[in-house]
Image: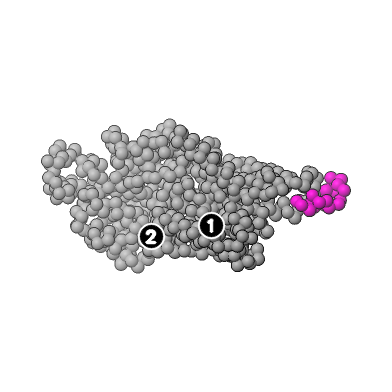
Amino acid sequence: MHDIVRMAPLIFTRDLSVRIGSHDVCRALNWQVNPGERWAILGKNGVGKSTLLKTLAGLRLAETGELIVCGAPIAVPPARTVGSTLGVPTFSRESQRTLAKRRGYLTQHHSDPFPSTVMETALIGRHPHLGRWDWESTADHEITRAALAEADLVGFAEREVQTLSGGERQRLAVAQLLTQQPQLFLLDEPLTHLDLSHQVAIMELFKRKTQGEFSMTSALVAVLHDPGFAVRYCEHALLLFGNGEWLAGPARNIITAENLTRLYGHPLREIGSDNDRWFIPC
Amino acid sequence: MPSRRRALTVLALLLALVVASFVVALATGSIPVTTHDLFTALFGEMFSEKWGGMGETSLAIEVVRGLRLPRALGAFACGGLLALAGALMQVLLRNPLADPYVLGISGGAAVGALLAMLAGLALWFIDLAAFIGAFAAMLIVFGLAHGDSSWTRTRLLLTGVIVAAGCGAAVALMLSIAPEAQLRGMLFWLMGDAGQISEPRPALVVLAAGLALALPFARELNLLARGDVLAQTLGVSVNHVKRGVYFLAALATATAVTTAGSIGFIGLIVPHLTRLGLMKLGWGNDQRLLLPAAALVGGSLLLLADTLARTVVAPQQLPVGVLTALIGVPAFLFLLGREKHA
């Protein structure tokens, strides 16, 4: 575990601007995600939450500004000078390997054009930890089995992926992410397709992965749609208003009925008490 | 998921299948060949003397060495190349039904070869023209699909299909204006015919090189088959690997088509069949095993099909491409039907 960054911010941005065409996702974002922190990204459909997450994962170019993820500089000001081929940031092989080991990215869509077992699919997460000629070892299988158990997929190992239900497939994606053993979890709508009990279970799981022994090394950034889940599992929030404006800080200050009403363009009312706040549309 | 040892066991078994196919191919034909002749032809006089042979070169030995062995090696190499190219194309296009010809490479080769035949050029010129045609088609498709630097699968596929259609029209045009005497040779070339193999070595070298180049990236291909974003997230240089796969598949296809014409169905059915077989064993779609396994199965299958093609209506010879299609179509429909029930 020698290559784990301790206590340095896992995400650092300075004056970062992210755009989709002519639409501003965020302008001059100055933001930092430290180990042990859990952040929720909230915003309306189409404001660019996924795009921002993709940029943070190093899979997409930022417009301008500085971005360092898990110690790997993804963009230095101005962002274009890092260079790009085919619309993807290029950085040293070393940075790419570092990123692949340290930051995990849960996508919204999972595709399985070829038949494959659940075990095989989850094992894919070990890829960045293996050398070119390595085959998955028994240790890798153990890690994967444990990850499947954590995602409540015990007994699914030999199942054919194409026979899974939407929720089961989503949990398999979570298991694959755990198999990768990243420090920084970037989750794009992790609760899609999940029933209520699994929504809670998965959020609890990621909470465990970023607190206690992991609080010095790991952090989480999740795009969520339910402000109630956001305040319950994330101590911090980043709101994207869709015109390039953003708001970041402790959830208790940021996630308020007033801000959410402005965010979603629909009046919301807060119910519950201090540690258990829920928001319902009026 | 196979372990390295299990994968090697499977490959060793498939190698035994390859050896068996060669024995069948070399021993079958209008001139009977004994086991002794076969060993002498392959391993020389020293071996036969040890076995107490007569030490004379019989007609059978000449036939095996001069005719059957080059043809068998060529057929094996082409089958292997087509299966390898098919497996690579299926990963690249993330479609289990893609085949090596889907991107117009065989069409380009056909245009080149038929032009050379129309001009009445020598055999090796036809090979060269086919290769140039294949590469021209490959570059056109790559260039057009790559135009704005975002090369999506749909765009690649559409460009390939259109270029293939264009080549098909050019081929039809040439066939309709070709003199009667050349028509038969042209048709045989188009259908794929191992009888035209003059020199198997280039194809064998390309097959070996192709496998040697693809295998170090096989795990990356496993990721690529599951999506670009996932692969990129886990540290694969997606665009570089994709370009590499494209050029490797194109080179393998061009070599196979240049050597023996456009033999159908091996490139589609063999990777599919191999994948299905490995799935049945519980080892899924692992390119580290699938790529070499498909190459060996493809080689053996084409070798056996060619043996059948030159013996079934002897002394008449059938173009092996017709035979592979005749076997391939029902086999494929059968597999498709089964998949629906599973």
Q: Is residue A209 magenta?
A: no
In the rendered image, residues at marks 1 and 2 fall on the same chain:
yes
Residue underneath mark 2:
B150
Residue designated by label 1: B106
Circle nearer the N terminus (1, 2): 1
Predominant SS along the magenta part = helix
Percent coordinates x, y for residue B253 in the rendering: 55, 56
Q: Is residue B4 visible?
A: no
Q: Nearer the viewer, residue B107 or B77?
A: B107
Residue B48 in the magenta stretch? The answer is yes
Instruction: Indicate which label's residue lies in the foreground, 1 or 2.
Output: 1
Q: Which residues are magenta?
A: B42-64
Q: Image check: B3 left or right of A193?
A: right
| Amino acid under disc 1 | Ser
Q: Residues within 10 Å of mark 1 (few under 14, many from 20)?
A: many
Residue found 27% across the figure and 34% down from its top: A196
Q: Position of residue A161 (x, y in %)?
A: 42, 38
Residue at image position (59%, 46%) is B324
